[in-house]
Amino acid sequence: MDMIKTRAAVAWEAGKPLSIEEVDLMPPQKGEVLVRIVATGVCHTDAFTLSGDDPEGIFPAILGHEGGGIVEAVGEGVTTLEVGDHVIPLYTAECGECKFCKSGKTNLCQAVRATQGQGLMPDGTTRFFKDGKPIFHYMGCSTFAERTVVPEISLAKISKEAPLEKVCLLGCGVTTGMGAVKNTANVQEGDTVAVFGLGGIGLAVIIGAVMAKASRIIAVDINEDKFEIAKQLGATDCINPNDYDKPIQEVIVEMTDGGVDYSFECIGNVKVMRSALEACHKGWGESVIIGVAGAGQEISTRPFQLVTGRVWKGSAFGGVKGRSQLPGIVEQYLNGEFELDTFITHTMGLEDINHAFDLMHEGKSIRSVIHM
Ligand code: NAD
Ligand code: AHE
Ligand code: ZN
Ligand code: ZN
């Protein structure tokens, strides 16, 4: 198979708009799969890496990690996927064989994580090129391209009934938020919840909390335009920290007779992470960090907060094992157990992808979905 031409949005350097161009793509090698991306969401993590704040950020790269597509070719030795299969690329692979996969304790498969973090395929090279020079992969997915090459273990095979321009959001944001509630926190009926940040992730936390039958869901954001959708999805209270002359954790502790059972930080702001922890109930409250903070940033609180029973946790991809569990989440969507339309505030072609980043930074979108 010869080199393939594909249109892609290339991030040539940090802080610069993406550039839409034709690049060369090497056919899938051993254990790899060629995927035609049908649609991709734009997640805040793409903007985070493009900003230059990501310690693993590497350029030039083809970003994007929230996609849905169709298998166009498979490399040598690929046995679990065939041409025509519908797939969601996974930034958290599932090999089923590594220590992490076998532990039963985590979804953080490490089989390809090291090379993935260096923007490379598992054999240590790239498949994308421009004028003979390599372009790095991103999070093992690079969905901001019409065609991409992904390791077999980084693809979830999903129902062909599922609309790829919607379920692409299950490649990151919606699965992350819902999964953090179910798998990481394990919220139970009657529990109280606070959600900090009402983007794609925070709103998916609200959906997860409603599904878990939480009794109270307090939604927190500094952009009040987000409150309407949060309420529509099931938030019981919406509060803006800027409306109070005391820390928001104190407000929440007063509202809830001592603090919430669970809180979720969905922003990536280390100060808010502290607020989210301290908004938890003494003795048992658990706070889950989902937001991704920039290079060099650290969290802090008085250790007394933990001594007195609050728990600080983190969650990646909602604790979901992509190959074994994501197909079932797609089925839940098809069965009408949750919806995705509310998240999709904008759709556009790849040529307008920089507008999707602008809308996100202006706080005007939840998710822009790029139709390839
Ligand atoms: P987003 O930009 O769509 O939403 C962020 C929201 O936070 C916005 O509504 C914004 O108004 C609000 N916000 C900003 N500063 C605030 C403050 N000080 N107080 C209250 N609200 C504030 O982002 P997103 O796509 O929903 O992603 C959220 C975070 O989750 C990002 O850091 C992203 O990188 C991270 N993320 C993590 C995972 C994971 O697996 N851990 C997966 C996806 C995204
Ligand atoms: N590269 C960053 C960390 C970025 C990060 O935390 N990524 C999340 C997913 S964000 C999706 O929108 C994650 O799952 N991390 C687990 C992993 O293995 O990367 C850094 O700080 O170096
Ligand atoms: Zn993401
Ligand atoms: Zn593994």
Image: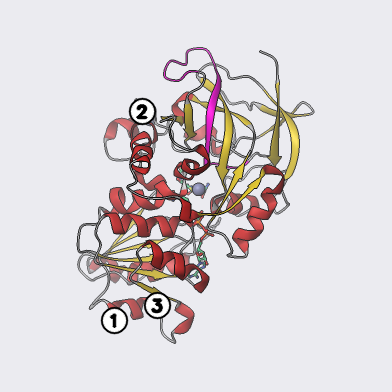
Give SS at disc 2.
loop
Please give the residue where the numbered disc 1 appears in the rendered image.
254
Please give the residue where the numbered disc 3 appears in the rendered image.
248
- Residue 68 highlighted magenta (yes or no): yes
Instruction: Name the residue at 30% across, 58% down.
Output: 209
Q: Quick check: can you spot residue 51?
A: no
Q: Quadrant of residue 235?
A: bottom left
Rendered position, 248 above or below 143:
below
Nearer mark to the viewer, of 3 and 2: 3
Please give the residue where the numbered disc 2 appears in the rendered image.
98
Rendered position, 23 above or below 229:
above
Which of marks 2 and 1 precedes in the sequence? 2
Q: Report the amino acid beneath label 2.
A: Cys
Q: CA distance from mark 3 to mark 2?
A: 42 Å
Image quarter (top left, top right, bottom left or bottom right) of the C terminus: top right
Q: CA distance from mark 1 to mark 2?
A: 46 Å
For ligand 4, the image quadrant comes to top left
